[in-house]
Amino acid sequence: MTSVAEKTTVESAPEPPATARKVSAWARRAPLLPALVFMIIVTQLPFVATLVISFMDWNAYYPDERGFAGFDNFVRVFTDVNMRDAVWTTILLTVGVVLISLLLGLGIALLLDRKFRGRGAVRTMMIAPFLVVPVAAALIWKHALYNPEYGLFNGALTWVWGLFGSDNPPQPDWISNMPLWAVIFSLVWQWTPFMMLILLAGLQGRPLDVIEAARIDGANGWQIFRSMTLPHLRQYLELGALLGSIYIVQNFDAVFTITSGGLGTANLPYTIYQIFYQAHDYGRASAAAVVVVIGTIIIATFALRTVSSLFKEESGR
């Protein structure tokens, strides 16, 4: 057994000097420095450059007129008619994709939460659309599905009309007739698995003993879903909506690939692309990009708060 003198010696051992503590702290942090430097170079320096350019009057067509513009570029961004139309299109696109994806993801998650043979394989196949490269997914929808001559949708219409003996099936040009919905459906196909994964994770955390007690007391499936499952999934629905909004607000691939920004489908990223690469107005394009980044940061802040509240609930159980 340790004597009292030995305990006193251990407890009263002098602390290491401040220099040794600093060296030890830097030794722990040193392996992270390359990653930190890389992140600053890749993300922060370009944003600082964009912020500086946003306050400049810089158009490649007029190189002699380059100078400091103050907040003029931001004023032009908020007063430009095309930019307001792009904002409205971005809102419609984001709301449409997020709502439809959440509803479909919730339905699929409820189905995949049930036990059946081959459930693991079905879950894996349902995730596949989210793993497809965005440009490739947009090309699939544009050429393999929407094409009026050889697309799958018009082929299905021809087959259905043939069952009823009709020789003149409708062959609509889906992209020309409903351009914004064409983009929305392609993004819904890709983002529904993401929403399904989040909601399926929420369903796995339900208190099953409470649900069984409710069934024993006579509650039917709809009552359990409305009063127990849906309130439990509220934060997961919020998280899916926020994360989906962050990415869809910045979506460029589907708009560029399917419609090339025409027919009223030009959202904010595509409009910034037009201002930068076609109008060569670097100052105004940078100001619009800064506005989009600030809006995305605001949405991301709410997403992080939702995630932290979910972690607190899980740790409190």
Image: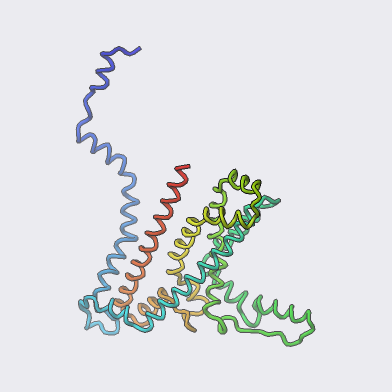
**Above or below: residue 196 compared with residue 69:** above
Residue at screen point 59% across, 43% down: 209
Q: Nearer the viewer, residue 190 or 257?
A: 190
Answer with left or right where residue 14 lies relative to residue 242.
left
Looking at the image, how many numbered discs can be counted on the residues?
Answer: 0
Image location of residue 59, percent across then percent down: 28, 81
In the rendered image, the residue lying farthest to the front is 217
Write down the quadrant of residue 210 in the picture. top right
Write down the quadrant of residue 168 in the picture. bottom right
**Above or below: residue 201 compared with residue 284:** above
Model colouring: rainbow
In the rendered image, the residue lying farthest to the bottom is 168
Q: Nearer the viewer, residue 269 or 196?
A: 196
Image location of residue 292, percent across then percent down: 36, 70
Q: Quadrant of the N terminus?
A: top left
Residue at screen point 48% across, 70% down: 95
Residue at screen point 64% across, 77% down: 151
Residue at screen point 32% across, 52% down: 36
Image location of residue 281, percent across then percent down: 31, 80
